[in-house]
Amino acid sequence: MVAHPVPRDWSDVFLTADGSRATVDDAAAEPEGRRGFFRRLRENMSKTRQALGAEIQATLFETLDEETWERLEEALIMADVGARTTAKVVAQLEMDAESGDLEGGEALTRRLTELLADLARPGEGHIDLRPEPTVIMVAGVNGTGKTTTIGKLAWHLHRELGRTVVLGAADTYRAAAVEQLTEWAARAGCEIVTGPPGSDPGSVAFEAVRQGRERGADVIIVDTAGRLHTQDDLMAELAKVRRVIAKQLPDAPHETLLTVDATTGQNGLRQAQLFSETVPVDGIVLTKLDGTAKGGIALAIAGELGIPVKLIGIGEALEDLRPFDADDFASALLAP
Amino acid sequence: MFDSLSEKLQATLADVRAHGTLTEDDIAKAMREIRLALLEADVNFKVVKSFTATVKERCLGADVVGALNPGQQVVKIVNEELAALMGGASMGLTFSPRPPTVVLMAGLQGSGKTTATAKLARWLKAEHGSSVALAACDVYRPAAVDQLRTVGAQVGADVYEQGTDRDPVDIARWALDQAKMAGKDVLIVDTSGRLHVDEKLMAELVDIRRAVKPTNVLLVVDAMTGQDAVNVAEQFSQAVDFDGVIMSKLDGDARGGAALSVKAVTGKPILFASVGEKLDQFERFHPDRMAQRILGMGDVLSLIEKAEKQYDEDEAKALERKLRRNEFTLEDFLNQLRQIRKMGPLTNLLGMMPGLAGQQLKNMKVDERELDRVQAIILSMTPEERRHPELIKGSRRLRIAKGSGTSVQHVNQLVKQFDTMRKVMRQLGKGKMPDLGALMRQGR
């Protein structure tokens, strides 16, 4: 099996004009950071993984009976992978096992990890920074971490890649959302375009893109208000924000990211589905992976809707936004 | 697929019903469906396991005898067990005999604490006439204090804040003194979101609890939470022994299995539900409704109840005869429409419909004004025209359009729709299940 060319590292997340991949200035710090991150991710996930991991180890290494499959199903469901995706994975694994290619529990576990990882990367996880300026729009349900994600992303683009970033505070609805983004802008060292509270989010987005272009910004990130995917009027508003951005700059937004809270259960699939019907969603930011939730719903989203996870949030600090790595994600789901 | 919870279960139970008797095999099959359905609703796996075990036992036991058919019995048992698990009647807050009553809010990041704080303040003012103050103890999230100040002003509650440089425990203690001096009835302490595994922040929450000795500690839980809800609830319960739960974002389409899990694992009641973006969209939690939301079965019962009240059996028989003979007229249609509308808004009714039809119709949005228009058009016809819609041509169309305040296009559309409907009825009469989706598309 040929692995997809997926980003494993910040340096491959962004596609840039000067060389196909962006280079990270601080190359020496990166392996350290990576180790730190994986250790952290493992530590964070280990508590809940204990049950899952122990279960899989104990069963897969023994005989493959009916009970094994059921327990495997249950284990994946406990990780919020969902019944349909779980059934798909288990059926595939069962087929592979029956064909006799897999000998022993270890091979099965490896195959299972592969299956999960493949599901988790339906496409390339790049974010293309070649358009000048690149407009990124961030949407999602209330409380999933849009503003925080934008702050961290802006910080990374500015501090690590030396890009000039302008933020557009198009969440004009929630109290103090603008102040929150303003503070992130200050931390990340970038400019921000705001409108008065209650003003039309479309006009703020328009203005942000306009001013961003005028100031020659490399990247413009537009924040939007949190909204439940079932609120038709608010979803229509989101579609309008997107249209307005395109009016200012054809082809923009170049990247639409949807934030999904890792603690979300099966409703996450509905969220991704309805958001992507409203605005084409290019990638998922799986936030709050630093808790005990495994974020298995991302597998369902990737598997059923073909939307890749591009970034993950693993904490509240500026550097706690990371590229998504499907292999690591899969083994983190399963490893003890 | 996600929403098929109630439909799936109903399909299985309908299958059981068809057998007449309930075999052990049937039960096993029904249990598997129930199990899957609950898991899809994000009810915790362990809770599901013990729940299905209980239901199975009751189904296998002496319960399934008597007048009800086995399928109905299973529905009843599941419903009862679910209601029992959710816990009886809804409860409220505890009020301190010596004000202020202190409410401490806790929860994960993004669960909706600040919004819930403001909504609870508004609710207390409206329901109990309380004077409420809010303490701004979220010093970590950028602009959280600003947010509380804004929503506090919107609901008419004083906000006690000291910026973000002081220790949240000190702020809480200071705010309590302020509330006492101001003679407030209730002080709600908003705290920053924290992970249940973050030892430092959990310790801080314990310290705040110790400092203000709250009358109520409330955990705010996002209705969309998955399997992890149990971990979160257990950890918060251990740390601060919360008294009750506020379910936030319950206005979405999540089944809210987390509510069931939290209740089952911690035994703590769900007290309030946040059901919209506006600050007054906050209500007492009704466990029985939640049971219905999770399984969607109670709705079937109430639909039957409603239909029984409104529907005359003789009329139904006459209608059926007409349908079979293809004698269904616009007059009958008008009667039907009126009878159905007596039961309440059509969208609600469609949502209550079980099985296949319910599944196909649930995403349909019914415009009640459209129905008004249909009624007006039919009422503008002569009895002869209602019985023989093929008579409606040229000048008649114009007259009907004028009489009903609509347009010729509307009249045409209705006649066409009715014709399609008759065709479907004919199929039904021949015992075929019509394709409702195709009907809708044709009707457009």
Image (tube, coloured by chain):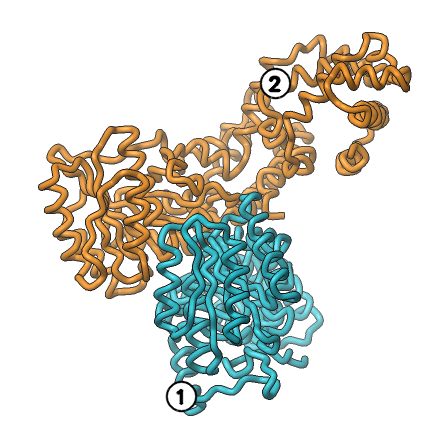
Quarter where residue B413 is shown: top right
Depth check: give the residue in front, A31 or A144: A144
Residue B271 seen: yes
Query: Are the numbered discs 1 and 2 placed on the same chain, yes or no?
Result: no
What secondary structure is marked by label 2? helix
Q: Which mark is residue A29?
A: 1
Residue B428 seen: no
Q: Is residue B183 left or right of residue B51?
A: left
Depth check: give the residue in front, B238 or B128: B128
Q: Which chain is cyan?
A: A
Q: Is residue B13 left or right of residue A334?
A: right
Measuring from the top left, give residue A246's x and y in whole percent.
63, 61
Report the mark closest to the observer, 1 or 2. 1
Depth check: give the residue in front, A294 or B406: B406
Q: Residue at x 29, y 57 (%)?
A: B192
Measuring from the top left, give residue A62's x and y in whole percent.
53, 69
Task: For the C terminus of chain B, give its image quadrant.
Answer: top right
Q: Amino acid at mark 2?
A: Ala
Q: Is residue B100 left or right of residue B343?
A: left
Q: Kindly identify which chain the residue marked by label 1 belongs to.
A: A
Farthest front residue in view: A214
Rendered view: B351 above or below B334: below
Q: Kindly identify which chain the residue marked by label 2 belongs to.
A: B
What secondary structure is marked by label 1? helix
Q: Which mark is residue B307?
A: 2
- Color of chain B here? orange
